[in-house]
Amino acid sequence: MNAQTQRTAVVTGAGSPRGIGLATARRYAQEGWAVVLTDLNQAGVTQSGDVLKNDYDVPVLALACDVADPDSVRAVVEAVAASDLPPVGAVANVAGIPSPSSFLDMSLDEWNRVIAVNLTGSFLVAQAFVPQMIEAGYGRVVNMSSVTAQHGGGVFSKTGYAAAKAGVIGLTKGMARELAQYGITVNAIAPGVVDTDIRVGSDEDNEKKLSAAVPLGRQCRPDEIAALYVWLSSEDAGYITGTTQSINGGTYVC
């Protein structure tokens, strides 16, 4: 174990090799954190865990988890408690799913799943690990919102996704107020278009249009968002809570 490793970061949605979750887990490991990676995709999160174990001298635990399922989240908490990892000091809620369906075409089943994964999942995972943070005397929760929550979407993900990610902002503010008494900070990150595989079926022309619509002229890299996750989890960010950090290349200026 790295001699500097004193805290563990729990990162959800870390099973994709080109995803924000793995990039975030990697950045935590680079900074000396122990890392718990979770994802619905068992094979993907196992592979992600192997990458980190090979590249960094920090403890790594890779676990399958459906963040929308309380029993699945509880199993992760129990596995972490049974391990020899240092105390959990940060939760990075990254797991999410897109929703390109329009308001009039969206089924109730799709609506419920989008809300469950993007919003309820963040609630369940944070609620499960915050008691450990209170006991340890250090805690950072960083939730994943989206620029879609700020401008309403319409380019790729639409109303359902915008509603879920707007809910994440409200969840973040409420948690920040309630948990401040324990010294725990809670913030959200609202990315614009990011160069990942989340837009399944998007063709090259569409990707170029998405990039051209960004004032900075390109899509965000996952490692840029990862850096923000880890900084918000640091001691340096201890007086920042209840905020939504926009990282969108100027797509939405607020």
Image (spheres, rainbow, N blue to C red):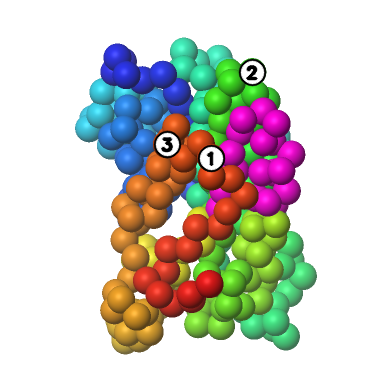
Q: Residue at image x 70%, y 82%?
A: 103
Q: Which residue is at the front of the view, 66 or 81?
A: 81
Locate residue 183: give its quadrant.
top right
Circle nearer the viewer, 1 or 2:
1
Q: Main secondary structure of the magenta part?
A: helix
Disc 3 + disc 2, Cβ < 8 Å: no
Label 3 – label 1 distance at C-alpha: 8 Å
Q: Which residue is at the front of the view, 247 or 66?
A: 247
Above or below, comparing residue 231 to residue 158 in the picture: above
Q: Residue at image x 54%, y 45%?
A: 240
Q: Residue at image x 44%, y 46%?
A: 229
Q: Amino acid at mark 3?
A: Asp
Crowding at dot 3, Cα within 10 Å, few <14 / some 14-19 / many 20+, comes out as few
- Residue that badge 2 annotates: 135
Crowding at dot 1, Cα within 10 Å, few <14 / some 14-19 / many 20+, comes out as few
| N-term mark: 1 or 2 | 2
Badge 2 element: helix
Circle nearer the viewer, 3 or 2:
3
Label 3 – label 2 distance at C-alpha: 21 Å
Q: Which residues are magenta?
A: 171-188
- Residue that badge 1 annotates: 239
- Residue that badge 3 annotates: 236
Q: Which residue is at the front of the view, 125 or 248?
A: 248
